[in-house]
Image (tube, grey):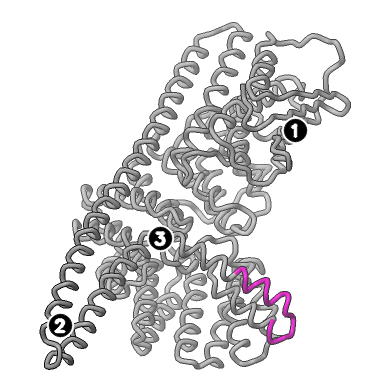
Amino acid sequence: MRTIILALETYLKLSGSKTCLMVLLIFFFGNFNSIAQNSSNFKIPYSDLSAVSLETAVDSLRQSVLDGDPNFETTSKHLLKRAKKQKDYYSAGRIHNYISHWHYLNNTKYPSDSIIFHAEKTVAFYLKDGNLDAANESYLGLAMDYLNNNESKKSEEAVLKAIYYFEETNNELWLAESQVQIAALYLSTKEPVKVIEYATLSYPVLLKNEEYLSAASALWYTSEAYKTLKDYTKAMEFVDQSIELSSTRDFEQNENLLVASYETKGDIYADQKMVDKALVFYEKAWEDNIALGGKENGDFFRYNIGKMFFLQENYKEALPHLIAGIKGKEHSKIDRASELYLTLSQCYEKLGDYPKAIEFRDKAFGYETELSQAKIEQLQSEMIVKYETEKKDEAIAAQEILLTQKNRVQYLIIGVAGLLLVLLFLLLYFFRKNKKASSIIFQKNAENELLLREIHHRVKNNLEMVKGLISLQSAQLQDSAAKDAMIASQNRVQSMGIIHQKLYQGDNLGSIEMKDYFLNLGEGVLDSFGKEEKVKIECAMTNLNLDVDTAVPIGLIVNELLTNALKYAFPNNENGVIKIDLSKTDNGTLSLIFTDNGVGKEKDVASNGTGFGTQLIQLLTQQLNGNMEESHDLGTSYTFYFKLGTAA
C-alpha cells in the first residue's frame, strides 16, 4: 500500500497534463454507483414525496439524476431542507452527492466550482454523520473533481486521506478502486508504463468482486496506455476486451464506457492515419452519446469527427463539427487546447474566411501562452540544463580547434586554454552562487506564501468560531429583537470569513473575485433566514478583483443590504428577486447597485429596526470615500459610488 502512496506522490509532482473528459466521467459514475449502491431504481412523483420517509425519497432522487428529471432541482432543494430540519446528516450528504452529479451531467450549464462545492458538502455531511466509509469513498470522487478543475494539490489531499483509511481498514475492494484511479491519474501525466502497472494490479480484484464498471475502465486505461506507447496491436486488444466486458455485463454506465471505447478505437486508427476507419468509430461514439445524454453532451465528441473530415480535405463538412466540438470542450479547463483552435483556424483558412482564421489562430496562441505560464518552473529548469549543455558543447568545440593548431602554435594554445579554464571556473563559481541565491529566494517566497495562506486560514477558522459562539448564544435568547441582532452579527462575521477563505483557497493572495464572493455571501444569508426557495439573488456583473481593504467594507455593506431586504422587503413570506451589480468605470470609480422588487419603503417613515445597520452602511461608505443614493419607486434601490485608492 505504501507503494501506491509513493506512486501517487510521484504523479502529483508530474501533474498538469490534459485528461480525457471521458476518463473522469467513468470514474465519476463509478463513485456515484458505489455510494448509492443500496438505492432502489424507482422514482416518486414530486407531489408524493412528503408522504414517504426521507430515506425513500432520497433513493428516488438518485433515479431522478439518471433519468434527467426536469424537476430535479426543485425536488433536491425540498429534500435538502427536510434533511437539515431532521438533522439527518447522512441523507443530506447523499442529496449533495446527487446535486454534484447533476451539475456534472449538465456541465454546460453549471460551473465546475458548483460540482466541487456539492462534492465537498457530501464529504462534510458524511463525516458529521460519522460514516467514515462513505466519506472516504466520496474523497476519491472529490479528488477527480479537483483534478478536472486543475487543482492538483487538493486532489492529492483528498486521495491520500482515502488511501490511508482503506489501508487501515484492510478494504481490498476500495484499495483496488484507488489503484484504478491512480492508473487514471498516470494516464493524465502521460506515463503509460505506470498506467499499465496499476490497472493490471487492480483488475483481478475488481473482477472477483463483480465491480464491472471499474474493471472495464481498467482495461480501457490499459488500452490508452498502449496507444501512448504506439503499440497499436495491444491497444486494440485491450479496448476490445473493455467493449466485450461492457457489452456482456449489465451494469450502470456500461453505455458510457462503450462510448469512450469507441472513441479510443477511433484514436487508434487516427494515430495510424486510417482516417476512414477512425471516422466510423468517432461517429458511432457521437451518435451513441447523443442517445445517452442529449445533443449538448454529444457535441463533446464532434471535434474528432471534424478533424477527420479536415484530413480528408472535406472542409465544409468539417467546419460545423469542429465548431460544435470546441464548444462542447470549452467549459472544461483541461480540455481547452491550442490544437483545437488551430485546426478550426486552418479550416476557415481553407474555406477562404481569413478574419475567422486569424481570430482562432490568436485564440490558439493565447491558450499556448497560458500553458507556458503554468509550467514556468519546469521551463526554467529545462533552460538551465540547456544552458549548461551549450557551455559544454562550446568548450569541446574550442578544444578541438586548439588541438588542430597544436603543432603550429603550441605555447599560444596552452595560454588560451589556461585562460579559458580560468574563465570557465569563474563562470561556474558565479553560476553556482547565483543559482544558490535564486533557490533561497524561491524557497523564501514559497514559505512566505504558505505562511500567508495559513494566516488567512486561521483567521477564517477564528471567525467561524466567533460565528459559532454567537449562534450558541442566540439559541439561549427568547427576545426576538435580540435574536435578530445575533443573526445579523453572525452574517457580518460570515461576510468577513468568506473573504479570508477565498484568499487562502485562491491563486492570488492579494485580491478577491467579487462576483463569486457575492454569490457565496448571498447563499449564506439566505440560508440564515431560511429563504433559499423564496428569494433569488442575481449577480449580473463581470468578474472583478478587488484588494482586501476594499472588498471587506463592500462585503459588509452588501451583507447589511441583504439582511434588510430579507427582513422587510418581502413580508408574508413572498417570493422576490435581489440584484447585485459591481463595476469599475473608466475614471477608476467603483459603482455598486443593489435592488430588490419588494414592497419598498414609504418616504419619511422610520425603520422598524434599531438603525445600527444603516449607521454601519453610512460609516463604511465614508470609509471608502463614497456616496449613496436611495430610491423606493419600484421596490428598493441603492446606488453607491466609491473612489478607488482614496479610502479614508
Which type of secondary structure does the marked residue at label 2 adopt?
Answer: helix
Q: What kind of residue is marked 1? A: Ile
The residue under the point 26% across, 50% down is: 437
Q: Amino acid at mark 2?
A: Ile
For the residues labelled 3 and 1, the Cα–Cα distance comes to 40 Å
Q: Nearer the viewer, mark 2 or mark 1?
A: 2
Q: Is residue 538 visible?
A: no
10 Å neighbourhood of mark 2: few (<14), some, or many (≥20)?
A: some
Position of 127 with respect to 254 (left or right) is: left
Residue tagged by mark 3? 376
Residue 125 x %, y %: 44, 38
Residue at the spot of label 2: 413
As helix, strand or loop, the secondary structure at mark 1 comes to: strand
Pick the quarter of the image with the N terminus: bottom left
Q: Secondary structure at mark 3?
A: helix
Q: Is residue 617 visible?
A: yes
Q: Which residues are magenta?
A: 349-363
**Disc with the residue nearer the chain's start (3 vs 1):** 3
Say few, some or many: other residues with alpha carbon within 10 Å of mark 3 (under 14 / 14 to 19 / 20 or more): few
Give, as a three-letter code, the residue at label 3. Answer: Ile
Tell which residue pokes out farthest to the top in this image: 479
